[in-house]
Image (cartoon, rainbow, N blue to C red):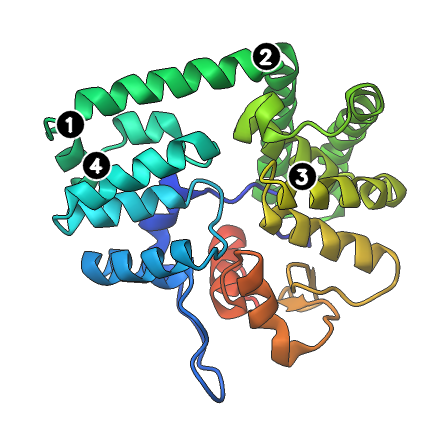
Amino acid sequence: MRPCSISLPHLTNVVSTALLLSAPLLAGAAPPATFFDAVEQYGADDVAGCTRTLDTLYRSGGTFPAGGELLLIECAAASGDRAAALAYIDTLLPTGRLPLDDLRTKARPGLDALRADPAWPAVLQRIAAEEHTRTAQRDAPLRDALLQREAKDQAAQHAAVAAGGGAAAWAQARSVSVENATWLKTVVAEKGWPGTSRVGSDGAKAAWVIVQHADHDPAFQAAMLPLIETAAKRGEGDLADYALLTDRVLLAQGKPQRYGSQFKENADGVFELRPTVDMDGLDARRREVGLQPLAAYKAVLAEMYGKQVR
């Protein structure tokens, strides 16, 4: 089985799947609240709780998934504190972490209220200025090529899942992965790893997807891992992506995975977690890189593949 072979949706779909995200009970003191706790609060219409959780995470330097800061703005505005929501926008715009199209157009109660605020025209001007700055820094042809290759990859992955996910189904997707990885090797050799400032967050994600699916070439995946780690630590990528690739690299080396992202399909058709180090500390490690608890991840995989996951 290849969990995370298909890119899981980010903030645009995270809210709509909030009911799937339920944190397990842990012994001892309660762990710090996470982004996924805020998603549950938002799904339960507790926008004030969502704001408190995400504000605490934000101020403590906690990990958000890609685009996740937009939920902080949404919850603050939906709770009636539009001034705080606008302040978050001012602070976050220069970081490149906000999905600007969603900020400008996505229909959500809080965002809709912000767009009716007298201060919104000035926000639009700042968004336009930020887009201009980002565009000037980007390698547009490279970004376009990455997105096109990711689209081809995702089509092949979806087709494999729809066909039942067996060896024959994945063989079709493998040829796409081989072609994409061969191309990306040349790109990295010539230009280095394509981070968000060069190709945008969507382009950087596309580059990671290509590496994540290059299971035919574990040496290539291992070589890209430190580049992806460095990019994530510099704000040029996502720690969650680094964690997911780490698991693939470790398993390919015959070692237990660290973040519990990889499963195998047993003879009875049930998906089971592959060997994982320190199960007691697993959810804490997942939390550090912005991944939801294992129980929630299993629920997402069960929904995606339509099979039992244990």
Q: Is residue 108 above or below residue 117?
A: below
The residue that label 4 is drawn on is: 111
Q: Is mark 3 on a helix, strand or loop?
A: helix
Q: In this view, does 95 lie to the left or right of 278?
A: left
Between disc 3 and disc 2, the foreground one is: 3
Measure the C-alpha gap from mark 3 to mark 2.
19 Å
Q: Earlier in the sequence, mark 2 or mark 4?
A: 4
Tag 3 near tag 1, CB within 8 Å:
no
Q: In this view, does 5 lie above or below 39?
A: above
Measure the C-alpha gap from mark 3 to mark 4.
30 Å
The residue that label 2 is drawn on is: 140
Between disc 1 and disc 2, the foreground one is: 1
- Name the kind of residue labelled 2 in the image: Ala
Measure the C-alpha gap from mark 1 to mark 2.
32 Å
Q: In this view, does 302 lie to the left or right of 35?
A: right
Q: Earlier in the sequence, mark 1 or mark 2?
A: 1
Q: In this view, does 68 lie above or below 128?
A: below
